[in-house]
Amino acid sequence: MASYAVRLMSRAVRDLDEIYGYIAHSLLEPAAALGTVDAIENAVLSLEEMPYRCPERRTGPFANKGYRQILVGNYAIVYRIDEAQRQVLVVTIRYSMSEF
């Protein structure tokens, strides 16, 4: 099975930094912050294989536009697949209860 390259867009990188910062500094839980970011990164990397396994977005601004999501805990990783380039582009990582 051929794999896909996974790329995080600048927004997704900022989102990861903000998630870590909020949990580590605002909630004063640096170990939980590391665990959460590790889990998100593992899920992102899992998209190298079978990125179509995750459902398309049905709500928010990314709905019904070909974007997909994978859920990790309370976070939604929103991405699209560029089949021509064989890559997965992670657009944003958001708290799943937020409006986006």
Image (cartoon, helix red, strand yellow):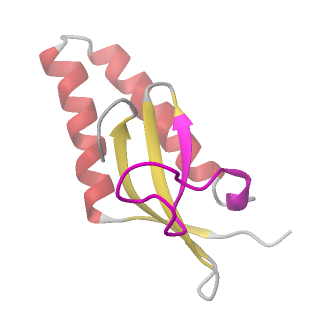
Q: Nearer the viewer, residue 21 or 95?
A: 95
Q: Is residue 48 above or below residue 39?
A: below
Q: Is residue 54 above or below residue 11?
A: above
Q: Residue furthest right?
A: 1
Residue 68 among those drawn in magenta: yes
Q: How many marks?
A: 0
Q: Residue furthest top?
A: 28
Q: Residue furthest left?
A: 26
Q: Residue at x 41, y 60 (%)?
A: 62
Going by the image, does 56 lie left or right of 94?
right
Q: Residue at x 52, y 67 (%)?
A: 80
Going by the image, does 48 lie left or right of 79?
right
Q: Position of residue 84 (x, y in %)?
A: 62, 88
Q: Is residue 44 above or below residue 42?
A: below
Q: Position of residue 39 (x, y in %)?
A: 51, 32
Q: Position of residue 79 (x, y in %)?
A: 49, 60
Residue 65 among those drawn in magenta: yes
Going by the image, does 65 lie left or right of 11?
right
Q: Is residue 36 above or below residue 92?
A: above
Q: Residue at x 18, y 30 (%)?
A: 21
Q: Residue at x 24, y 21 (%)?
A: 23
Q: What segment carries the magenta color? A: 51-71
Main structural element of the magenta stretch: helix, strand or loop?
loop
**Image quarter hosting the N terminus:** bottom right
Q: Position of residue 72 (x, y in %)?
A: 52, 32
